[in-house]
Image: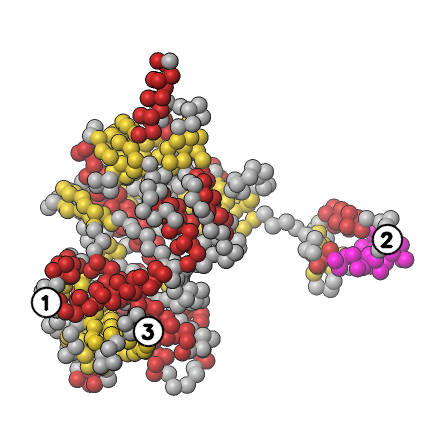
Amino acid sequence: MSNTIDFEKEIISFLKKNKHKSYKINELQRLLKIPQNEYENFRIYLAELYKTDKVTRYEGKRYAFKQVKTTFKGRVEVTPRGYGFAFLEESGEKIYVAANDLKTALNGDLVEIELFAETTTKGKNREGKILKILETKVHTLVGTYQKSRKFNFVIPDDNRIRRDVYIDVEESLPAHQDDKVVVELYGWEHEKINPTGKIIEVLGKTGEPGVDILSVARSFEISEKFPTEVEREAKNLPATISNKEIDKRMDLRDLVCFTIDPFDAKDFDDAVSVEVLENGNFLVGVHIADVSHYVTEDSLLDKEAFLRGTSTYLVDRVIPMLPEELSNELCSLKPKVDRLTYSCFVELNENVAIKNYKIGKSVIHSKRRFTYQEVQEIINTNEGDFAKEIALMQKIAKKLTKKRMEAGSIDFATTEVKFKLDAKGNPVEVFKVERLDSHRLVEEFMLLANKIVAQHISKEKKKDLFPFLYRIHEKPSPEKVQDLQEFIGALGYEVNKPKIMTPKEFAKLISVVKGSSEEFVINEIAIRSMMKAVYSENNVGHFGLAFKDYTHFTSPIRRYPDLIVHRLLYEYEKRTEINPKRTEFLQKRLPVIAKQSSEMERNATDAERKSVAIKKVEFIEKYIGEEFDAMITGVTEFGIFCQIEQFGVEGLVHIRELNDDYYKFDEKHYRLIGERTDKTYRLGDKLKIKVKGVDSYDSKVDFVIVYDEEQENFVTKKTRRKKR
């Protein structure tokens, strides 16, 4: 190669000046005036520039300037503060979008976004602006109807929607001032003009019993009502089980099995059993409602279940995935009646090692309907119905838990809050749900069945010919793990830093703080560092459970993926030969089901959290001005979130309330630090707070700090210095 010609500079400079044209190699040689004796070096260097992605090569070996892509597709998440983020489809990169650059994008919209030049500030998101909306996700919204002399409009409940919606009165259902309504959007043409729409449903007057939670359901596009034709299909299903159907199945009607559910449950989709075999091993049985017998592929019920994805559990109601004729009747494993099921039997030895298993369709006759509290009482006293079986189940469950934890399964204790509502839907009592041994018992049996079913497919079937649906949980990113390690190390603990972060190593990492005052803090950070569990046709295992194979098999009444798993199990059991067309269909269909189910699961979870937040605000409003013990559960640049320990109600101490110093946000270590005093507010710190006020519209609670131990120490030290 020549030492006198800088080929890269010459070629790229020329192509950049002529970036809308392409050239053959001999054209470039002539235009760049490359001597003939340098041609071979020139050709080699040009090929190298193409290989290293510095120039573009088209058909016919025509070379052109490498255009830098600046526009991408992405999904938008709009924040209540007005700005948003776009998550790029190609890379998943998170792009900051200022309020003025959002145009008419609503939360969840697919957009085309143009990126600005990369920032030089370390750790900052790149920024961009939205060019156009490619696909809008928000078609309806819920809000409060308002009348004026010149026009009528709706104020959206969702504070991420930044404009009121003008109402087309002539096309709308009649509504009155302050009614909660559902609006169908016509569209939003320009950011300087408000969107327009029509009222398609009137939910009731703001403040009426149940209207608030119904508004939550509608705002997440979750409907209590099923289409008429779907209801009709459900009602036409046979209410009795034929002898012909029973003859096809394992007849387990004499087996001692029973259900264990919350006291207010109406759909019972799993029953459990246990026996001691002649060889001394245990035979655990998990019997799941055979929804697939009634909801067949491509039926109207099936299509509606696919769209819903899951049942939604709001504060005062359940919105089921399937009509009540199925969820509460035909498929519900009620006591003293025959029910069609899919059973998973697992033979375990004394050390709960799996020795054998059997999966197949069955019919059962549940002997009793237990609540968790009733089973817990039997565990505690060893007295009551089926006390012998329950004691054995408890023994097995404890061993399964121990074995799972030793393998690296992570068990984060989460707090569930429930409300007691009066006749008007007002919360009169809030209480934390205690996690009982009976909960653990059922959980371990369900985990075991889910794991066995996934293992059965992974080991017995060829994945390319028998596609399947898995519940997966990918391992946390190395960056998140490193942040967690550094945080634990900064607290003075010895930190393991293995080359490969396995579930067992991750569990070992956070176990060093078990029983300490920092346990809550570390668990919270560990949860935030982990990926979300989702559904997928690709089996990458479940990191959090430390399972190589895992699926969802145990709740087909309320989860669509479980219904699919039942269908696939039965299809593969009966398939006698390879069916390439069916395999190809499933390979295309399962990713769609996985994506839809994961999205609807998140949607339902968000709706459930919103309904709880509304009732928490209603409940705590009567305690304005009162003081409570609290713990810091979140730290941001605009303040600290604290949870009242007595009620589990969370609120914000705004940064402006911390007026004794100027506080800086240390994002990496989840704390605020006083610039002058070094006073620190950290995740997990205990405080005494006063309820300052509530914002019912945004479901927010404001606190002020009235006492904290570190502040007391700081004041005491300051006083001592003055005395000296």
Residue 55 in picture, x, y percent from top left: 71, 54
Q: In this rendering, would 490 be left or right of 147?
A: right
Comparing labels 2 and 1, the label whose residue is closer to the camera:
1
Kind of residue indicated by mark 1: Asp
Residue 475 visible in the picture: no
Q: Earlier in the sequence, mark 2 or mark 1?
A: 2
* Mark 1 surroundings within 10 Å by alpha-carbon count, few (fewer than 14), some (14 through 19), many (20 or more): some
Q: In this rendering, would 385 be left or right of 480?
A: left
> What residue did someone put label 2 on?
2
In the picture, which quadrant includes the N terminus?
bottom right
Residue 34 within the segment the image draws in magenta: yes
Q: What is the distance, in whole Å, between disc 2 and disc 1 at their CAs? A: 92 Å
Q: What is the distance, in whole Å, between disc 3 and disc 2 at their CAs? A: 70 Å
Q: What is the distance, in whole Å, between disc 1 and disc 3 at their CAs? A: 28 Å
Q: In this rendering, would 490 be left or right of 617?
A: right
Residue 37 within the segment the image draws in magenta: yes
> What residue did someone put label 3 on?
354
Residue 279 visible in the picture: yes
Relative to 424, residue 506 above or below: below
Q: Residue furthest top?
A: 723
The quarter of the picture where residue 461 lies is bottom left
Residue at 37% x, 47% y is 513
The quarter of the picture where residue 536 lies is bottom left
Task: Write down the region rendered in magenta.
Answer: 26-48
Tag 2's secondary structure?
A: loop
In the picture, which quadrant includes the C terminus?
top left
Kind of residue indicated by mark 2: Ser
Residue 311 in picture, x, y percent from top left: 26, 59
Tag 1's secondary structure?
A: loop
Q: Residue furthest left?
A: 384
> What residue did someone put label 1 on?
385
